[in-house]
Structures are given as structure tokens and as C-alpha cells.
Image: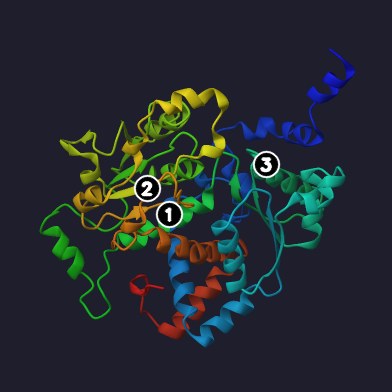
């Protein structure tokens, strides 16, 4: 091999830096959770396994309070003073619209100052600076680093870097994973669950009795209950390469009696991965794999059985040249939602999508947008509120939110009936 070829094949400094954390990264998630927490609350937010059900409920409650407080000038002023002394770096080296703007809005709701690096060509990385040096430099100037990267496990490695610095009394700040390679997107899963939590409260309009909608639905669905337990969740599209699917499925697996149905082509890159299937089955989850939305599930068409449907686009940016011929033989129309199928869905079943929606593929046609079950735009807005709640938790000011809320509203707890 020529010297030039040897140089080309040699690992980069970034790769060598990442490799030093490999043994820690490869451990089971349950062995890592404690390292990312301090005194009973999250220090770093890296993967969805850090959100037990009780924390999901607490974050939803805080998000509800923040969204209601934000409706008044007094509440806005209170929120703006919560973290006005904190600075956040949004380090987004992978394209993003919703996640970036959602986090920026969440920071601004709590009064945080935000700066950003979205194009590494404008940073010192063009001069040879490693990503780990960049992260450590950001920690010198900011109190929080929110990062999104195409590199798998980079966010987790950066969290270990911060922990190592903390042990030597060097400056260390929280790391929040806003998407890391194809691995995890924990805060997307958080907002997805928050949307389901609000939807499955079955709240009535403000001028109606709170239980009236659920009572009406129970005439046709007598076993229907509030909450996320005991429901059938459908996932459709690019299952194998969808980090949002992985993260949300891991959270839903914590709820008793759920069925997770995955609708995807049989291609190895697109179908449910073996490792995720094993993880879910080890949790006692009923896992079903289907070839189309019309496949039979419990004696009926699957689309008619779902209590919630999570649509995804086919992520063409991950296609390999070797996959082209096999993909050309797949009938992708089976992974697009039609108006007829929506009409046959349960009347309360929300339709979710992590966005962006692919106008060319058409997994959800725009004519579905006006259906009351189409929750994806509301889902995106929910991300702003629950990410604000997450930041309040990380910086230990969520108890201040609760106290001020109760000073303003007493024991009134119907915040989930407020839509905004």
C-alpha cells in the first residue's frame, strides 16, 4: 500500500477521540443512566432510556404549566427571568429546521441567551480543530450545549468528556442530544409522548364536562381508558433507519399492555432491526411486523386497529447505491396513508409524523391535514413546550414553575384542556 493510501485509511483524530469512549458507549443503557444524572435529575440528555414513566409525567405537567403561564404578561415575565443568567450553544452540524427552532424557542421562553454553530465550515474545524475540542471550547463560554450531528454516538461521547472534566474540577456543562446519527433522538420521542399524553386525556372543550368526550367514545369502545397503557401503536415507513422510531418505541415499551406494530418493507435496511425487536420483547412488549397498513391485525385491517399511527418518510439520504435495484422492486404505495384509510381509523386515533414530510414520496397527503386526528403540526408545537420543561428540569427550576403556577391558579389543574 502506498504512503498516500495509508494516510487515507488512517483514523482521524475525531475517530480516535470517539474510540476512547467505545467501551463505555457499548454498555447496556441501564448501566449508563446513573452517569448522566445528578441528585435525582438529568444532567445530560442522551438517550430515551433516561425517561422513566414518572419523569415523563412530571415533564408533561411542567410543560402544561409553562404553556399556560406563557398566556399572560405576568407569566411571561416570570418565565423570562427563570434562566436569564444562562447561555446555550446550539451546535447543529446536521441540517435541521424544527428541532433547531424548537430548542431555540424553548431557551428563549425561559430567558436563556442563545448562540449557534450550524455550518462547521464557518468554525475552526476547517482549520483542523476536532469536534471534541469544539465542544470543550463551547463549555468555556456557555452553560449548556445542545447538539445535533450525523455522527452516531457523538453526543454520548461528549457527555463522557464533560463527566471526565467534572471529576478533575474543570468546567463541565450539560449535553443535550438533539439527534445523533441513526441512533437516538430522545427529545423528539419526548415531544411525541407528550402529544400522546395530551391526546389520550380525551379532554372536552372548555365549556363541556371534562369526561363527556371519553364517555361518548366508550359507547363504541367500552374498554377505552385515558393514558398510554393498553393501546396499539402503529409505526409506518422507514422503520430500520428511523432514529425517532427507535426512541419513541423505547419509551412506549415502558407502558403496560401496549402493542407496537411496525409496518415496513421487508428490506433489511427498512424493516425493524433485530436489536430493537429483542429490546422490546425483553420488556414484555407485544411486537407485530406487518407488510402494509391493510395487513390483518387482530382480525381486521391494521389501520383500523391502531389507537395511534406514527408515519415516517423513506429517508432517501441514507440510500446506498447497492440498494437501488432492490428498492426499485418495492411497492412503496403500501406505506402511504390515504384519505380512505383515515376515514376507517378510530375516531380518536392521532396521526403523528416527526417531520419533515416528503412532498415527493407523499406518505401523508396534505388533504389529510384538516382532519382533527392529524396531530403533526400540533406535535411540532408541543416540542417547544416540553423542551422548555426539560431545560427547566435540567437546571432545577421546575419547582419554581410549579410554585408560581399554584400562586397564580391555586389548585386548578386542567391545563391540558388548554390548546395553544
Image quarter for residue 215? bottom left
The residue under label 2 is 310
| Horizontal side of residue 325 vs 392, given as left or right | left
At 22% from the left edge and 49% from the top edge, which residue is drawn? 340
- Residue count near mark 3 (Cα–Cα under 10 Å), binned few <14, some 14–19, many ≥20: many
| Residue depicted at 86% across the width and 42% down the height | 128
Residue at label 1? Answer: 192
**Sequence-first tag of 3 and 1:** 3
Residue of label 3? 154
Q: Earlier in the sequence, mark 1 or mark 2?
A: 1
| 31 relative position to 412: left or right | right
Would you say the residues marked 3 and 2 are in contact, meaning their CB atoms lie under 8 Å apart? no
Residue 59, above or below 180: below
Outermost residue on the top side: it is 1
Q: Disc 1 and disc 2: Cα gap in Å?
A: 9 Å
**Helix, strand or loop under label 1:** helix
Provide residue 342's location: percent of width, then percent of height. Answer: 25, 51
For residue 125, side relative to residue 343 (left or right): right
Numbered disc in front, either 1 or 2 = 2
- Residue 81 seen anywhere in this rendered image of the structure: yes
Q: Is residue 320 above or below residue 226?
A: above
Q: Closest to the observer: 130 or 161?
A: 130
Amino acid at each position: 500500500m502506498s504512503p498516500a493510501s495509508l494516510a487515507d485509511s488512517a483514523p482521524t483524530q475525531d475517530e480516535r477521540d470517539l474510540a476512547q469512549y467505545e467501551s463505555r458507549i457499548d454498555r447496556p443503557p441501564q448501566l449508563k443512566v446513573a452517569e448522566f444524572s445528578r441528585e435525582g435529575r438529568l444532567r445530560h440528555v442522551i438517550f430515551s432510556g433516561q425517561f422513566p414513566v414518572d419523569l415523563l409525567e412530571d415533564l408533561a405537567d411542567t410543560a402544561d404549566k409553562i404553556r399556560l403561564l406563557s398566556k399572560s404578561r405576568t407569566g411571561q415575565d416570570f418565565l423570562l427571568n427563570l434562566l436569564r443568567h444562562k447561555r446555550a450553544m446550539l451546535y447543529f452540524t446536521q441540517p435541521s429546521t424544527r428541532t433547531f427552532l424548537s430548542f431555540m424557542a424553548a431557551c428563549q421562553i425561559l430567558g436563556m441567551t442563545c448562540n449557534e454553530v450550524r455550518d462547521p465550515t464557518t468554525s475552526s474545524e476547517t482549520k483542523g480543530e476536532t469536534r471534541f475540542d469544539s465542544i470543550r471550547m463551547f463549555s468555556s463560554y456557555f452553560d449548556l450545549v445542545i447538539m445535533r450531528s450525523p455522527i452516531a454516538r457523538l453526543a454520548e461521547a461528549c457527555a463522557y468528556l464533560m463527566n471526565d472534566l467534572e471529576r478533575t474540577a474543570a468546567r463541565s456543562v450539560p449535553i443535550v442530544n438533539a439527534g445523533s446519527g441513526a441512533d437516538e433522538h430522545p427529545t423528539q420521542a419526548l415531544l411525541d409522548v407528550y402529544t400522546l399524553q395530551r391526546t389520550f386525556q380525551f379532554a372536552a372543550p372548555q365549556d363541556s364536562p371534562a369526561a363527556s368526550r371519553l364517555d361518548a367514545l366508550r359507547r363504541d369502545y367500552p374498554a377505552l381508558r385515558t393514558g398510554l397503557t393498553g393501546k396499539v401503536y402503529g409505526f409506518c415507513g422507514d422503520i430500520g433507519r428511523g432514529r425517532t422510531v427507535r426512541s419513541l418505541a423505547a419509551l412506549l415499551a415502558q407502558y403496560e399492555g401496549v402493542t407496537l406494530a411496525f409496518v415496513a418493507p421487508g428490506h433489511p435496511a427498512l424493516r425493524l432491526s433485530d436489536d430493537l425487536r429483542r429490546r422490546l420483547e425483553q420488556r414484555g412488549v407485544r411486537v407485530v411486523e406487518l407488510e402494509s397498513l391493510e395487513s390483518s391485525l387482530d382480525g381486521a385491517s391494521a389501520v383500523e386497529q391502531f389507537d395511534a399511527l406514527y408515519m415516517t418518510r423513506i429517508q432517501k439520504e441514507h440510500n446506498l447505491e447497492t440498494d437501488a435495484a432492490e428498492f426499485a422492486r418495492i411497492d412503496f404505495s403500501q406505506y402511504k396513508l390515504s384519505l380512505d384509510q383515515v376515514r376507517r381509523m378510530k375516531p380518536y386515533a392521532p396521526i403523528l409524523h416527526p417531520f419533515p414530510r416528503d412532498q415527493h414520496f407523499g406518505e401523508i397527503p396534505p388533504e389529510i391535514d384538516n382532519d382533527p386526528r392529524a396531530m403533526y403540526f400540533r406535535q411540532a408545537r408541543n416540542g417547544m413546550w416540553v423542551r422548555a420543561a426539560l431545560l427547566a428540569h435540567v437546571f432545577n427550576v421546575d419547582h419554581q414553575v410549579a410554585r408560581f403556577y399554584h400562586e397564580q391558579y391555586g389548585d386548578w389543574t386542567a391545563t391540558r384542556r388548554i390548546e395553544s
